[in-house]
Image: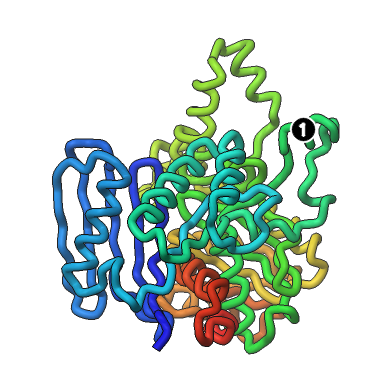
C-alpha cells in the first residue's frame, strides 16, 4: 500500500501547530500545538482524537528545531513517528508566495530562495515558515515537502482588482500590489459551499467571509477568486481583532508629523492595538457581545463599526460578482457568533439576502444554511478546515491515490 498520511505544519514566530491526517478516511491521527518557543514557559499540547487522550509538557523549548523534534517524539509515542513508511509527505503553510507561487509547490533550494526573497513583504510570517521548512527537511530529507501558500488562491484576481493606483514603475519595483491572505480557507470554504448547494464550484458565485481575530472577505466566481479584502499585507480590509483594516493612508503621515510617532509605533498601533481592541479594549467577540448585553455603549459602537465595514464589503462584492448564489460565514467568529451573522445581513433583503432566526441560532460543526427557504441568495455557515486543504493539496501534488476525488468532495 502506498503511504497515506500527511503531516501539516504551520510554523509561526513562536509556535508550531501541527496535524497528522489519514488521507484514506480524512481522520485526524494527531493534533498539537507548541507555543512560546524560546521562552522558559514553553508548552506542547498533543491530542489523539481517536481516543481523546491529551498530553501536555511544560518547560523550555529553545528553538523551532527542538520544537519539531519534540513533536516527532510525541508522534512516535503513538506509533505515528516521522520515520513511519505510511508518512507520504509534509505540507507546510507559507503565508506569502507573491505572484511567483500560484499553486502548491514541491520544496527545493530554489523554492526556499524565492520564499526568502519575499520576506520584506511578510517579515513576521515567512521567516518562521522557512524555519519550519528547514527543520522538517533536516529531520526527513528523503520525504517530499510541499509549500502551500496563503496567497495562491488569490492570484486569479484580475489586474483591475490587484493593482493599486500608484506609479506603476514604483509598484513593480517594490512588488506593491494586493495579494490577499487566508487563501486556503477561502478555497476550501467556497468549494464546500458549492457542495452544500448541490452544485459544482464552477457554477457558483460566492462571497466568503472569513471572520476570526484576523478577518477577510473574498468574491469567488466559478471557483476562482476575483477580489479579496486583504492587500499587500493582512492589514487591509475588514475591522479585525487588533488590526484597523481600511483607513486613509494619510492617517499614517498625520500620526508621524503631528503625533510624533515613529514608523514602528504606527505599525504597532495599526496591527496590534487597533481594530476591536483599539475601539473598546477587547478583541474577543464573545466578550464584546456580553458587554453589549450589559448595556456597554463602547462595546456597542465597536460592534457597529465592525458590522458597518462588513456590510460594505458584502455590497461591494455583490456588485463585483453581479450574481451571488451564497454568502458564507466561516472561522471562529463567522462560525460561532450568530449576532454577527444576523446584523451583517439585516437590511439586505433587497439583495435577496435574509437570515432565519431559528436556523441561525443553531450551534453545529456541520456546514448548514441559515437563510429561509424563500431567500433568493443562500446564507451559509461552513466551518473552515485549512489543515485539510493543505493536506489535500500536498497529497494531490505528490500523486497520492484518490487525491483528486477527495479534494472535489471536500
Q: Quadrant of the N terminus?
A: bottom left
Instruction: Mark 1: give few (<14), some (14-19) or many (20+) Cα within 10 Å.
Output: few
On the rendered structure, is 316 left or right of 55? right
Q: Is 83 above or below relative to 232?
A: below
> Depth check: 90 or 404 in front?
90
Q: Residue furthest front?
A: 142
Residue 180 lies, in percent from the top left, at 64, 51
Residue 163 lies, in percent from the top left, at 79, 44
Residue 23 lies, in percent from the top left, at 43, 80
> Depth check: 84 or 338 in front?
84
Q: Is 391 above or below relative to 276?
A: below
Q: Residue at x 62, y 54 (%)?
A: 151
Q: Residue at x 57, y 56 (%)?
A: 149
Q: Residue at x 67, y 86 (%)?
A: 199
Classify mark 1: helix, strand or loop. helix
> Depth check: 44 or 65 in front?
65
Total marks in image: 1
Residue 238 lies, in percent from the top left, at 60, 48
On the rendered structure, is 246 left or right of 29? right
Q: Which residue is mark 1?
A: 173
Colouring of the image: rainbow
Q: Residue at x 47, y 55 (%)?
A: 212
Residue 339 visible at all: no
Residue 81 visible at all: yes
Q: Is 396 above or below relative to 97?
A: below
On the rendered structure, is 263 left or right of 83? right
Q: Is 328 above or below relative to 98?
A: below
- The quadrant holding residue 227 is bottom right
Amino acid at each position: 500500500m502506498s503511504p497515506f498520511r500527511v503531516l501539516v505544519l504551520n510554523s509561526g514566530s513562536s509556535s508550531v501547530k501541527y496535524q497528522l491526517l489519514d488521507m484514506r478516511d480524512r481522520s485526524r491521527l494527531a493534533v498539537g500545538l507548541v507555543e512560546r518557543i524560546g521562552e522558559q514557559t514553553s508548552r506542547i499540547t498533543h491530542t489523539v482524537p481517536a481516543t481523546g487522550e491529551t498530553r501536555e509538557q511544560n518547560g523550555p523549548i529553545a528553538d523551532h528545531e527542538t520544537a519539531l523534534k519534540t513533536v516527532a517524539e510525541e508522534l512516535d509515542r503513538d506509533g505515528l513517528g516521522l520515520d513511519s513508511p505510511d508518512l507520504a509527505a509534509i505540507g507546510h503553510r507559507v503565508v506569502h508566495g507573491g505572484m511567483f507561487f500560484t499553486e502548491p509547490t514541491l520544496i527545493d533550494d530554489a523554492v526556499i530562495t524565492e520564499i526568502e526573497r519575499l520576506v520584506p513583504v511578510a517579515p513576521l510570517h515567512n521567516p518562521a515558515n522557512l524555519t519550519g521548512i528547514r527543520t522538517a527537511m533536516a529531520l526527513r530529507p528523503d520525504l517530499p515537502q510541499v509549500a502551500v501558500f496563503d496567497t495562491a488562491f488569490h492570484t486569479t484576481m484580475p489586474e483591475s482588482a490587484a493593482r493599486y493606483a500608484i506609479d506603476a514603475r514604483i509598484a513593480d519595483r517594490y512588488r506593491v500590489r494586493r495579494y490577499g491572505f487566508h487563501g486556503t480557507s477561502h478555497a476550501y470554504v467556497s468549494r464546500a459551499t458549492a457542495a452544500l448547494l448541490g452544485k459544482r464550484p464552477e457554477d457558483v458565485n460566492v462571497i466568503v467571509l472569513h471572520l476570526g481575530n484576523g478577518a477577510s472577505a473574498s468574491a469567488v466566481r466559478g471557483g476562482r477568486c476575483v477580489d479579496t479584502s486583504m492587500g499587500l499585507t493582512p492589514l487591509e480590509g475588514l475591522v479585525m481583532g487588533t488590526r484597523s483594516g481600511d483607513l486613509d493612508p494619510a492617517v499614517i503621515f498625520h500620526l508621524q508629523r503631528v503625533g510624533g510617532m515613529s514608523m514602528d509605533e504606527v505599525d504597532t498601533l495599526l496591527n496590534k492595538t487597533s481594530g476591536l481592541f483599539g475601539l473598546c479594549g477587547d478583541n474577543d467577540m464573545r466578550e464584546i457581545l456580553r458587554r453589549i448585553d450589559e448595556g456597554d455603549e463602547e462595546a456597542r459602537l465597536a460592534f457597529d463599526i465592525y458590522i458597518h465595514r462588513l456590510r460594505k464589503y458584502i455590497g461591494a462584492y455583490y456588485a463585483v460578482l453581479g450574481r451571488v448564489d451564497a454568502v458564507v460565514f466561516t472561522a471562529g467568529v463567522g462560525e460561532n457568533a450568530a449576532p454577527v451573522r444576523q446584523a451583517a445581513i439585516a437590511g439586505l433583503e433587497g439583495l435577496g439576502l435574509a437570515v432565519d432566526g431559528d436556523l441561525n441560532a443553531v450551534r453545529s460543526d456541520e456546514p448548514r444554511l441559515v437563510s429561509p427557504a424563500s431567500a433568493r441568495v443562500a446564507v451559509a455557515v461552513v466551518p473552515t478546515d485549512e489543515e485539510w486543504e493543505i493536506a489535500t493539496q500536498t497529497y494531490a501534488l505528490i500523486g497520492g491515490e484518490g487525491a483528486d476525488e477527495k479534494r472535489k468532495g471536500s
